[in-house]
Image: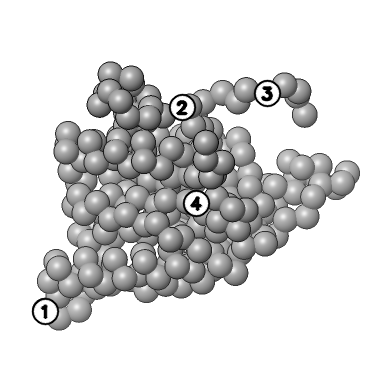
Amino acid sequence: MSDKKTALVISAHAADFVWRAGGAIALHQSLGYEVTVACLSYGERGESAKLWKQEDMTLERVKKARKEEAQNAANALGVTDIRFLDLGDYPLRLDRDAQDQMVDIIREVQPIWMMSHSKWDPYNTDHMNTTRFALECRMIAQAWGHNPGEKVLGAPQMYLFEPHQTEQMEWKPNVFLDITSVWDKKRAAIECMQGQEHLWNFYTNVAENRGNHFRRNSGGMAGGRKAEYAEGFEMIFPQTVDELT
């Protein structure tokens, strides 16, 4: 029986995993996990304005540029398994074929935990539709009657990473992860996303603010653990524990 530790991050667009989960990805890679990143689209239509402002730009050239950025970012985070499903964006085409692809990936990876977007995002419905899609695929991957004979999925936690405007998204973090030790990797990955340079400092500030929340919730002035940078997540499913801490 394999003791390999795996995780799966499902990203609507090619940059989402970098801004919102780059620290978690890099940290777990350093801890011996094999983190798979599945990008449902390149974000070629809705999240590539800088590229489209160039003369004679084409859809295929935008896709190529976005794929290169995401691949470089994955390399910076230590990821060796990044998948591009090329399902289009604005809107994503989350049909039965896409569902079958994702269920196959989930069963192949057998993740200990999964990660995707907030449940609600009125500014970008691709994001919230991705999480609904991810939860449906998780459910199907657990079904013994789906492609009988394959290894079914257990019960991985689903973490929802931070959206762009938390106060509008009904997202409430209940986990803060210290990413200070891998911040240099996340920042390097952020800087790979040349098409969205306006977000570089924004997500640096988010990580600094979450570092403050980590310190406060780990004890604050009465002995809180130091963390310069952190990421916040919302858990979907209950934890099972033997002792309360």
* Mark 1 or 4, closer to the camera: 4
Task: Rate crowding at label 3 as few (under 14), some (14 to 19) or many (20 or more) other CA atoms within 10 Å.
Answer: few
Question: Looking at the picture, how far across and down is residue 230, in whole percent?
Answer: 63, 53
Question: Looking at the picture, how far across and down is residue 227, in whole percent?
Answer: 72, 56
Q: Circle 4 — which element?
A: strand
Question: Looking at the picture, how far across and down is residue 129, in whole percent?
Answer: 29, 37
Q: Is residue 131 visible?
A: no
Q: How far apart are the two marked residues, 1 and 3, measured between alpha carbons?
A: 57 Å
State which quadrant residue 23 falls in.
bottom right
Q: Circle 1 — which element?
A: loop
Q: How far apart are the two marked residues, 2 and 4, measured between alpha carbons?
A: 17 Å
Q: Of label 4 and label 3, which has the lower sequence position?
A: 4
Give the amino acid type for the residue marked by disc 4 in the picture.
Glu
Give the amino acid type for the residue marked by disc 2 in the picture.
Gly
Q: Circle 2 — which element?
A: loop
Q: Which mark is residue 154?
A: 2
| 117 in relation to 204, above or below | above
Q: Residue at x 15, y 68 (%)?
A: 60
Q: How far apart are the two marked residues, 2 and 1, measured between alpha carbons?
A: 48 Å
The residue carrying mark 3 is 241
Which image quarter holds the C terminus? top right
Front in this rendered view, residue 180 or 57 = 180
The residue carrying mark 1 is 56
Q: Circle 3 — which element?
A: loop
Q: How far apart are the two marked residues, 2 and 3, measured between alpha carbons?
A: 17 Å
State which quadrant residue 50 falls in.
bottom left
Left or right? Give the position of 118 relative to 240. left
